[in-house]
Image (spheres, rainbow, N blue to C red):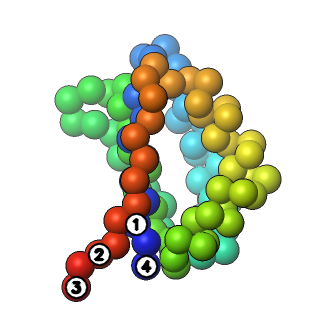
Amino acid sequence: MLIRLVRMTFAPEHVPAFLALFHASENRIRQQPGCRHLELWQDADNPAIYCTYSHWDDAAALAAYRKSALFGEVWPATKRLFAAPPVAFSVNPVL
């Protein structure tokens, strides 16, 4: 399993647009092959910072999603709302 975290900082006035976009897309993302879990987190100190937390079968499943039409629709729309560059990284659980 691969865990993906993406930290995104938005201009405060763009937060409602981001939330609408996320809620319109979240179920379709969860239905992507290899996606096992997806959550949206909000920073405890800055309400304009959000993180997505997702579980994927493996790096290949995440890569396939990143090449999908859905990603091509959602990510550019999300990027337009950023106030700072996102920080994204993948980790593996230690058992």
* Vertical side of 2 occupied by 18: above or below: above
Give the spatial CA distance, label 2 vs label 1: 8 Å
Question: How packed is label 4: few (under 14 Cα within 10 Å), some, or many (20 or more)?
Answer: some
Q: How many marks are shown on the rendered structure?
A: 4
| First reached walking from the N terminus: tag 3 or tag 4 | 4
Q: At x 53% / y 71%, what residue is drawn?
A: 59
Q: What mark, if any, has residue 3 been given in the picture?
A: 1
Q: Amino acid at mark 1?
A: Ile
What secondary structure is marked by label 1? strand
Q: Which residue is mark 3?
A: 95
Pointers 2 and 3 in contact (CB under 8 A)? yes
Q: Which mark is residue 1?
A: 4
Mark 1 or mark 3: whose residue is earlier in sequence: 1
Image location of residue 84, percent across then percent down: 43, 23
Which amino acid type is shown beneath numbered disc 2? Pro
Residue depicted at x 40% and y 53% = 89
6 above or below 60? Answer: above
Kindly tell me whether residue 17 is visible in this rendering.
no
Q: Residues within 10 Å of mark 2 (few under 14, many from 20)?
A: few
State the residue position of label 2.
Answer: 93
- Distance from disc 2 to disc 4, alpha carbons, whole Å, reads 7 Å
* Quadrant where the image shows the C terminus: bottom left
- Report if the CB atoms under discs 2 and 4 are less than 8 Å apart: yes
Name the residue: 20% across, 29% down: 45
